[in-house]
């Protein structure tokens, strides 16, 4: 098995701004595992908030190159466990490796990853499309140029209610609101009472990640469901979020890949929590991996590839205003576009 690393600067269609970050370029590392006629692909993107750079991801993979290339695994789950000590120090690199191994394994069996897991789906769960923070006029322009049935609106400004009211004039689509830790408790309750009448489905991570007392208040008093994002990283956080959030947004890079994500989904459902899987502005490589989990989810945020000026791989695609998930082997990515 040969490890090959591909580095990309993904140019965004618009500057992407949230409450704690803003960027025009998303740096991405594509990990390829080549074994004979098959290649498995995984992706991790750099994150200022979580402190992972492409250089750090490359470094941990190079340190473990010999073990990765010589490993004789029986299953992706076994591989994840045996590599976890070395790779858990960088969950983003760990995720790219885990997705690539899962992709390679399913390709060797000649089936899609979701079918290999025994999950049949028509892939009809609709992803939201994200509108990043900007002026009201520019946010309205972004919405109008991309008609879609569900939007995630990034907030955390002094004009949040005005933004939702203005955008609501333009569409009857579902709205989901993500404050990215930008609000306080009372502000959230006030906004939730306003937004429930404006077609908002839920509020994602309104408070800073460690404000558990505030989160408890919102869990008990908010008229809209509260979904965890920054407050949930790995498997141990599912139990911690129970009784503080109505649902969780699991991200492959934060938890270390598809293998732990599937366990997290199962555990969250056992607690009666809603489950969402989100993206971190990946290309179609990362989004195709997320798509394999669709049969297990209540909500999905897999619009990352739609925010890019151009694509670097095949896999999921946009056709007739719909995200189309290929039914080909593995995650559905056969090659990278040079």
Image (cartoon, grey):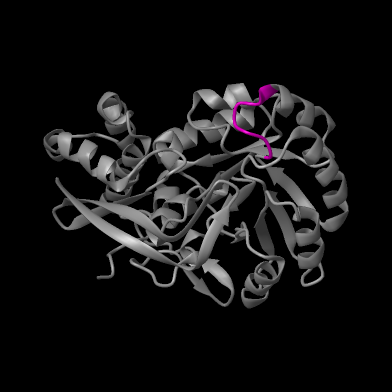
- The residue closer to the viewer here, 1 or 155, is 155
Q: Residue at x 38, y 55 (%)?
A: 331
Q: Position of residue 97 (x, y in %)?
A: 29, 42
Residue farthest toward the front in the current orientation of the protein: 158
Q: Is residue 251 left or right of residue 191?
A: left
Q: Position of residue 137 (x, y in %)?
A: 70, 71
Q: Position of residue 61 (x, y in %)?
A: 21, 39
- Which quadrant, please, contains the N terminus? top left
**Image vertical order of residue 9 relative to residue 46, above or below:** below
Whether 209 is among the magenta residues is yes
Q: Quadrant of residue 269?
A: top right
Whether 118 is among the magenta residues is no
- Total marks shown come to 0
Q: Residue at x 21, y 56 (%)?
A: 38
Q: Residue at x 58, y 52 (%)?
A: 18
Any part of residue 131 in sight: yes
- Which quadrant, please, contains the C terminus? bottom left
- The residue closer to the viewer here, 155 or 250, is 155
**Image vertical order of residue 137 relative to residue 283, above or below:** below
Q: Is residue 62 left or right of residue 297?
A: left
Q: Position of residue 7 (x, y in %)?
A: 26, 57
Q: Which residues are magenta?
A: 206-212
Any part of residue 126 in sight: no
Q: Is residue 100 left or right of residue 210?
A: left
């Amino acid at each position: 098995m040969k490890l090959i690393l591909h580095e990309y600067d993904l140019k965004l269609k618009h500057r992407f701004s949230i409450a704690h970050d803003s960027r025009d370029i998303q740096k991405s590392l594509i990990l390829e595992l080549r074994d004979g006629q098959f290649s498995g692909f995984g992706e991790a993107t750099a994150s200022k908030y979580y402190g992972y750079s492409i250089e750090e991801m490359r470094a941990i993979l190079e340190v473990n190159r010999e073990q990765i290339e010589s490993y004789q695994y029986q299953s992706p789950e076994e591989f994840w466990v045996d590599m976890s000590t070395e790779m858990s120090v960088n969950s983003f690199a760990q995720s790219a490796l885990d997705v690539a191994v899962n992709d390679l394994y399913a390709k060797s069996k000649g089936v899609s990853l979701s079918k290999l897991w025994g999950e049949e789906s028509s892939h009809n769960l609709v992803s939201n499309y994200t509108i990043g923070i900007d002026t009201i006029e520019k946010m309205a322009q972004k919405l109008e140029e991309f008609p879609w049935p569900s939007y995630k609106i990034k907030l955390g400004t002094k004009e949040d209610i005005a933004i939702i009211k203005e955008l609501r004039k333009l569409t009857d689509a579902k709205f989901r609101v993500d404050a990215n830790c930008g609000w306080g408790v009372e502000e959230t309750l006030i906004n939730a009472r306003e937004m429930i009448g404006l077609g908002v489905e839920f509020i994602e991570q309104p408070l800073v990640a460690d404000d558990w007392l505030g989160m408890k208040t919102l869990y008990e008093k908010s008229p809209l469901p509260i979904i965890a994002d920054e407050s949930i990283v790995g498997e141990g956080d599912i139990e911690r979020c129970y009784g503080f959030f109505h649902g969780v947004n699991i991200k492959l890079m934060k938890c270390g890949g598809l293998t732990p994500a599937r366990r997290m989904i199962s555990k969250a459902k056992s607690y009666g929590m809603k489950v969402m899987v989100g993206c971190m502005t990946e290309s179609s490589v990362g989004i195709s991996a997320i798509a394999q989990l669709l049969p297990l989810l209540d909500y999905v945020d897999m619009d990352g590839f739609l925010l890019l000026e151009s694509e670097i791989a095949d896999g999921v695609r946009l056709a007739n205003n719909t995200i189309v998930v290929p039914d080909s082997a593995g995650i559905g990515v056969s090659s990278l576009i040079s």
